[in-house]
Image: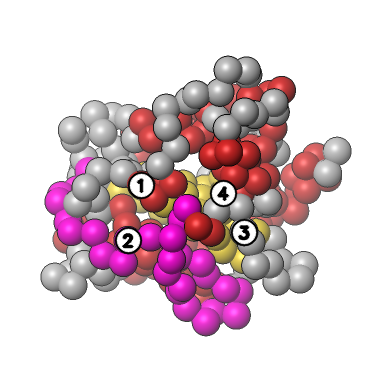
Amino acid sequence: MADEGGHVAAQNDGRSRGRRSGAGLRLGSARSAIGVWHPCPDVPRLLVIIASTRPGRIGLPVANWFVREATAHDIFELETVDLAELRLPLLDEPKHPRLREYTKDHTHAWSATVDAADAVVMITSEYNYGYPPALKNAIDFLHHEWRYKPVGFVSYGGVAAGTRAVQQLKQVVTALAMMPTQASVNIPFVNQFLGEDGTITPNEVMVQAVPAMLDELLKLEEALAPLRAE
């Protein structure tokens, strides 16, 4: 597979939840916390999805760095779901998700988590010009829960910085009436930013890209809110 960016032992594997107060990260189980938000009043909720499930993925350090930056920017209540911890099976619902006639507990839980979000960020690697199959599976489980929500992308890889995966994802999310941001966070040759302790040390371009994308997400979230309320 191309452009994952290298093999790294997973650090702090699990679910991180950023608070608007900037209090930092709390790590725990994605499965035990799914569907549970701890909202701040009048603050929109941002769902951060870690797409790669591969052992040794660099997506987890990238996600931990992004959540720290997003928490410091302080405009969203954050909830992070790691698809490696969520462990959704391959789509196993007998009816089309637009009917919302779910038969499985894992689908009801995933539906509640996505439904509670006002905006979404997908953190994705690139495999052979595409994005991870676990992310497509997680998207396809649902329908209405995604509609009229803005979505941003944090991508990483080699020379292309995961951008070819993002281009494919934009086709998928727009089919669900989501609105991709123009701004994004794209990390080329991602291994150069990974320290021996398994944490990301960003450059100035990366640092500036996060608030630019989040500010655009907030504008789109406010514009789309009336449609989500229908």
Label 1 crowd (10 A; few <14 / some 14-19 / many >=20): some
Residue 127 falls left or right of residue 211:
left
Residue 119 falls left or right of residue 64:
right
C-beta proximity under 8 Å, tags 1 and 2: yes
Type of residue at label 1?
Ala
Cα distance between the residues tagged 3 and 1: 18 Å
Report the residue marked by disc 3.
36
**Number of dots carrying numbers:** 4
The magenta span reads 4-31
Residue 47 falls left or right of residue 4:
right
User: Quarter holding the N terminus?
Assistant: top left
Nearer the N terminus, badge 3 or badge 1? Answer: 3
Residue 18 picture location, percent across and down: 52, 70
Report the residue marked by disc 4.
120
Q: Is residue 11 covered in magenta?
A: yes
Task: For mark 1, give the secondary structure.
Answer: helix
Nearer the N terminus, badge 2 or badge 4? Answer: 2
Residue 110 picture location, percent across and down: 57, 42
Residue at left 45%, top 74%? 25
Q: Is residue 1 covered in magenta?
A: no
C-beta proximity under 8 Å, tags 3 and 1: no
Q: Quadrant of residue 15?
A: bottom left
Report the residue marked by disc 1.
84
Nearer the N terminus, badge 4 or badge 1? Answer: 1
Asked if 181 appears above or below 98 in the picture, the reply is below
Compare residues 69 and 108 and report the one nearer the observer.
Answer: 108
Type of residue at label 4?
Val
